[in-house]
Image: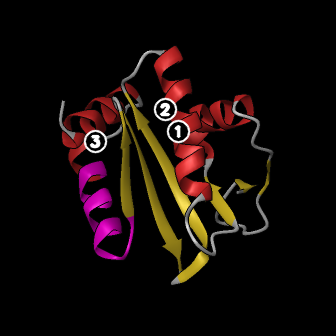
Amino acid sequence: MTPEDIIEQDARKLGANPETVLEGVHHAISKGGRLLREGDSLLLITPLRGDKSRMFMHFFSVASPASAMSNVKKFVQRVRAIPNLKLVYGDTKDQQIIRLLQMAGVKVLASDIPHFTWMAEV
């Protein structure tokens, strides 16, 4: 399964337009974002306003719940290894990632930036 397949299937599952989501992912990557992959899960991380200590993240997955949890644990390790990264942010569309992050032992808090609904220290 290609990353595009994962994004498209995840978008459909959430009722979003897959083409619009793919365009957003490509735009984020063109602005310095990175797409990480573990199995049938992807994590898009994008620096906030050029600040590499704070990044937006979005989780895409078509993995089973058990595989998604394992993938998130691996993503947490990879994100923690990014130099100078202190905080990651997300929005309410990322409810699955909030639960998985909490299950992986990451403390998720209300965001200190109004545009986002949650943040987590890495």
Q: Which residues are magenta?
A: 21-33
Q: At 51% across and 16% down in the image, what residue appears?
A: 65
Q: Secondary structure at mark 3?
A: loop
- Mark closer to the chain start, 2 or 3: 3
Q: Which mark is residue 17?
A: 3
Residues at badges 3 and 1 in contact (C-beta under 8 Å)? no
Q: Which residue is mark 1?
A: 74
Amino acid of disc 1: Lys
Question: Which quadrant, please, contains the N terminus?
Answer: top left
Q: Which mark is residue 71?
A: 2
Residues at badges 1 and 2 in contact (C-beta under 8 Å)? yes
On the rendered structure, is 12 left or right of 95?
Answer: left
On the image, the x and y values in percent for residue 87 come to 69, 64
Q: Secondary structure at mark 1?
A: helix
For label 1, the crowd category at 10 Å Cα-Cα, with few meaning under 14, some 14 to 19 and many 20 or more, is: some
Amino acid of disc 2: Asn
In the displayed structure, 94 sits above or below 122; it is above
Question: Which quadrant, please, contains the C terminus?
Answer: bottom right
Q: Main secondary structure of the magenta part?
A: helix
> Which dot, 2 or 3, sits closer to the camera?
2
On the image, the x and y values in percent for residue 25 come to 31, 57
On the rendered structure, is 37 left or right of 57?
Answer: left
In the displayed structure, 15 sits above or below 37; it is above
